[in-house]
Image (spheres, grey):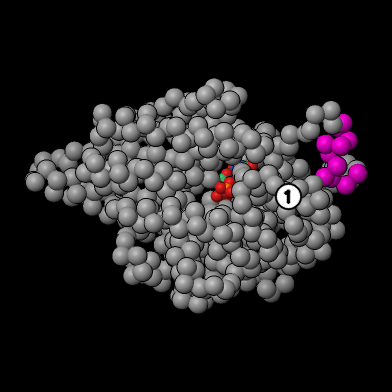
Amino acid sequence: MEETQPLKLYFIHFLAAGHMIPLCDIATLFASRRHHVTLITTPSNALTLRKSIPSHPFLRLHTVYFPSQEVGLPDGVENISFVTNTDNLAKVLDATAMLQSPIENFVEENPPDCIVADFLFPWVHDLANKLNIPRLGFNGFSLFAICAIHSSKSSDSLLIPTLPHPITLKATPPKELTEFLDKMMETMLKSYGLIVNNFAELDGEEYIRYYEKTTGRKAWHLGPASLISRTPQEKAERGMESVVSMQECVSWLDSKPEKSVVYICFGSLCHFPDKQLYEIACGMEASGHGFIWVVPEKKGKENESEEEKEKWLPKGFEERNVEKGMVIRGWAPQLLILNHRAVGAFVTHCGWNSTVEAVSAGVPMITWPVHGEQFYNEKLISDVRGIGVEVGAAEWTSIGFGERQTVVCRESIEKCVRRMIDGGDEAQEIRRRAQEFGEKAREAVGEGGSSHKNLTALIDDLIQVREAKLLH
Ligand code: UDP
């Protein structure tokens, strides 16, 4: 029998850690099935990717010039997750918009069999149509969130009654966000299908069917992407080089009892004001439990003294908690931390990657959504799947460095941490379910698991599309 020619696939990731990390991990899945994968990226993101995704003979990176000078950015700042002020955030977005034409030129000169692109590049729709190739959409959301966004259009209140599980959100999304998401999703839904960084069991058959029924489209669950195999060093450098060494982190955790440490991290785009950070510190100290707390690198104001810069921490906090806690200022090796036996709960902003990484590690969550689609994810975690508890955050903001109107108070933080770590029937039940989903996640990506099978089905489908085209 004639051997099938490998597929030629291009992946175009958006320039934010939460979008780039999972899509590039997913790209490696196709390469590991011996299909020819090209990741289209920019020079500084390519450096990160080379260190954090396993090298593979079928995976290559193609870099396009990133116009830093043209927009007035320092060299090497090519990702919105690595900026520390609003100005640079806008500049990275401006420069990103300028990538369209070099990417189009490259793709048109060397057309692939399929393009997988982030939904924040809606122009790929026309490009794929022009070349008559299938485009697969990706936005890094759970299918649950996509269904909820789709359904919330028909509801003016916090209640979304039409979903398989009616949910009541804790906050109203900003209007600009809803409008923006609707626009991006409209183009995404015109794609050949959707790639989802989740496993079917966590979104649930009911949501997969609901999605197919309400949109008429297909979605392929291929995740959790974080479970692709990689060395501990590649794990530690996933997304960005960590500011703490892997050894320091692991040996600190090794010294702690099982399931005793709370891991606190709000992803790569959330910048809380000092008063909120102060409440977190007080809440954690009052709980008496161990913690690893990740605080993004802060850019102090000019002429600010060291003391001024550190006023988000109560005086003497780190000295008092030297045994109990570790504050990581900057990028942390999240996958290593979540998978350590000492971690007993995760205070999370419910970014989808963080969520599915915690699920894969079997770690229950304390949910604290901030922006994007995180308030929907919170509902999946707490009400629908029962693998976490809500801290009570009710302010849905846009991504950026602006002030927030409300703070989650130290008492709520302390209460949730005690609820999860002190134990009791409720906590045990939540932990049991979290561990069960962790097992299902690992099964899904293994030989014969649901995500493994979906990948085979998607590849077969794309091969058929190519063959049908050849016959015409
Ligand atoms: N991440 C990390 N270390 C950090 C912060 C984030 O490794 O200090 C990773 C995390 O594991 C996840 C991604 O960055 O893969 C963040 O994606 P998510 O969807 O959770 O949140 P976002 O950053 O998009 O808000």
- Residue 120 visible somewhere in the drawing: yes
Residue 86 part of the magenta segment: no
Classify residue 254 as left or right of residue 184: right
Classify residue 377 as left or right of residue 219. Answer: right
* Residue on which the image places disc 1: 403
Q: Which residues are magenta?
A: 305-315
User: Dividing the picture into quarters, in which one does residue 30 lie?
Assistant: top left
Report the residue at 44% width, 65% height from top: 150
x and y, in percent, of residue 81 in the image: 59, 39
Looking at the picture, how far across and down is residue 182, in whole percent? Answer: 45, 58
Q: Residue type at mark 1: give it.
A: Glu
Q: Is residue 367 above or below residue 165?
A: above
Mark 1 Cα-neighbour bin, 10 Å: few <14, some 14–19, many ≥20:
few
Whether residue 439 is visible: no
> Label 1's element?
loop
Residue lying at 61% horizontally and 52% vertically, measured from the top left: 398
Residue that appears at 38% across and 66% down: 211
Name the residue nearer the viewer: 322 or 136. Answer: 136
Quadrant for ligand 1 reads top right
- Residue farthest to the right? 315
Query: Is 383 or 118 nearer to us in this picture?
Result: 118
**Residue 256 location (% of width, % of height):** 74, 49
What residue is at 55 percent from the left and 34 percent from the top? 92
Residue 314 in the magenta stretch? The answer is yes
Queried on whether the Cβ of the residue with tag 1 lies below 8 angstroms from ligand 1, the answer reads: no
